Image (cartoon, grey):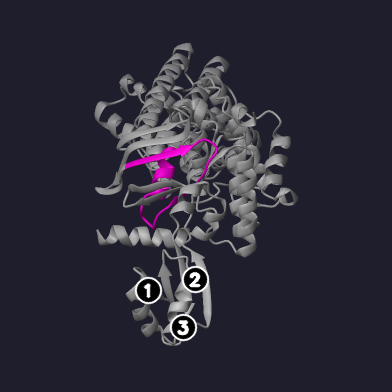
Amino acid sequence: MNAIEIKGLKKSFRGMHALNGLNMTVPVGAIYGFIGENGSGKSTTEKLICGHLVKDGGTIKLFGKDYTDAGIRVRVGALIENAGCFAGSSIYTNLKMQCLNLGIADIDAEISRVLKIVRMDAHRDLKFKKCSLGMKQRVGIAMALLGNPALLILDEPINGLDTDGMKMMREILTDIAKGGATVLISSHILGELEKIATHYGIIRQGKMVQELTAQEMEARARVFVSLRVNELQKACQLLKQKYANVRIEQDYVRVYDEQDVDGIVKYLLDHALVPSEIKKNKVGLEEYYIELMSQKENK
Amino acid sequence: MEKVNRLAFDTPSFGKRIKGMLAVDFYRLFHTPLFYIFLAIAAIIPAMIVGTTGMEGSETAALFTNVWQAIAVESPLYIVKNIGQYANMNMVFIFGGIMVSIFIGHDYKSGYVKQLFTTHAKKQDYVISKTITCAFAMACMCGTYLVGTVLAGLLVGLSFAVNFGSLVCALLGKVIMSLGWASLYVFINIIFRKNFWISILASFFFGTGILIIGAAAILGNSAILNIFLYGSSVYACLSSNFLSVLVCLLCSGVWAVIYNVLGTYILNKSDVY
């Protein structure tokens, strides 16, 4: 069973197509990294799943049922844009209101549980308006976690966080996923997403460009050898004679899809070019994404 | 095993959903200063009205000879010839409209509405819950208005002579009308949910009953005006009887259903924000 199954989803705002027949499949238990440039339709998709927007066409199924099914929706938690808390109320009061809304019996225990997960148990009486950005994001996740959701939808939860905040958020999200919830997370910070996601969906201009698992991503990730040489242009021209994909990037000559480091170095040395630095790398999510987008752009 | 357990989905009944939504709305109502401020305002209004009866040359001095006139008019009078005739418990419904606008406006301003709609697929839950909560708040305002009137009347020394049965019917009618007015304001706030100030202005505009007063100027003092909220609110007067209560109940109930159905329809057919 899939946690989310979207087919032909359409949404437009005043004639502008935000989603243009989006298809999307999120398996149960996945941490699904939802990637796309600004305005590609990530947030619109998430808002549609949460029922905040009305779709123009297509179907959304959550755990095999229509997304409007009350039984399913009570097990969905979301952090879309902001935490949705009353600024003048304490963190505890805000969480209590959502507990009442969900009809949770042991409110205190539930609030303690979620605050512990987001490392906020020491701040429960703090007014929401006094929280830092990172704290507000964590309170938002705590709100979404109330009632033990089976599906968690997080829109850019690590945006604006510092390094420590990002690390903490990564740990929190990993803990949540361990608990069995399916997590749909959109983010621009692909390096962070790469560390936690089990599946990826790449969206562009309201359409799904590619969906792949982390393993598939790993298998598709191209390897390359980076070399720092004094005469970059000369080295590049020389290597192009022997290797198919050679580029100069960030003061390095990069030989793509080639793992024979010894062969490359020997070839350069034979032509009196001595590399001062040699690295063997793998294309990460960010590079993969950029390359995929540039391919689409060229088409 | 844990994952299997997590994927059990129990569909909550309508009653359970409404209970949850009402619980959060009433919790909010009782835990925000807004409600208490408006209760105080409702108590101060009659005190000011009755207080001015002692002032020489004031509008109300000539109109008010009995303290209960601050609660309702003597007989159904839809055409207001003097601003002082406005000055009764119907004013609660004007201030109540502003309270509803602020109460619902905060849902949207804070983004809390997103949490509600994520977990409550049925928009109807939201509309019903808000209507009941706001109707309760306005009924409470009617209560403090009554207290304010009595205290001010005692201080000024106005006459308390009244047909007790009619007074009870008038009060009951006004309290019942809270439901209809609350549903109207919830509906207005759903329409203008993205424009807080327009919501407040629209609530104030409709709360004054100016359209009905205008209609009364054309139609005359016709009983047909009782089909409207303002008309029935006026009909709950000091000569009320059981029929007046029934008229209020019918009018308030029918409009509450109409506005709730329309509000739910609009929410279902349009984006939340």
Q: Disc 1 marks which amino acid?
A: Arg
Pointer 2 residue: A261
Q: CA distance from mark 1 to mark 2?
A: 16 Å
Mark positioned earlier in the residue sequence (1 or 2): 1
Residue A178 placement (x, y as % from top left): 63, 41
For mark 3, give the secondary structure.
Answer: helix
Q: What residue is at 36 percent from the left and 55 percent from the top?
A: A39
The dot on residue A247 is 1
Confirm whether circles 2 and 3 share one chain.
yes
Residue B43 placement (x, y as % from top left): 60, 38
Q: What residue is at 46 percent from the left and 23 percent from the top?
A: B237
The chain to which mark 2 is attached is: A
User: Would you call the spot at circle 3 few (<14 residues within 10 Å), some (14-19), or many (20 or more)?
Assistant: few
Does residue B55 appear to the left or right of A107 in the view shown? left
Asked whether B14 falls inside the magenta stretch, the response is no
- Please say if A61 is above or below B57: above
- Please say if A28 is above or below A184: above
Q: Disc 3 marks which amino acid?
A: Leu
Mark positioned earlier in the residue sequence (2 or 3): 2
Bounds of the magenta segment: A22-49
Which numbered disc, 3 or 1, marks the residue closer to the eye? Answer: 3
Mark positioned earlier in the residue sequence (3 or 1): 1
Q: CA distance from mark 3 to mark 1?
A: 19 Å
Which numbered disc, 1 or 2, marks the residue closer to the eye? Answer: 2
Q: Are marks 3 and 1 in contact (CB under 8 Å)?
A: no
Q: Quadrant of residue B190?
A: top left
The chain to which mark 3 is attached is: A
Q: What residue is at 56 percent from the left and 42 percent from the top?
A: B48
Q: Is residue B252 visible?
A: yes
Q: Are marks 1 and 2 in contact (CB under 8 Å)?
A: no
Quadrant occupied by the C terminus of chain B: top left
For mark 2, give the secondary structure.
Answer: helix
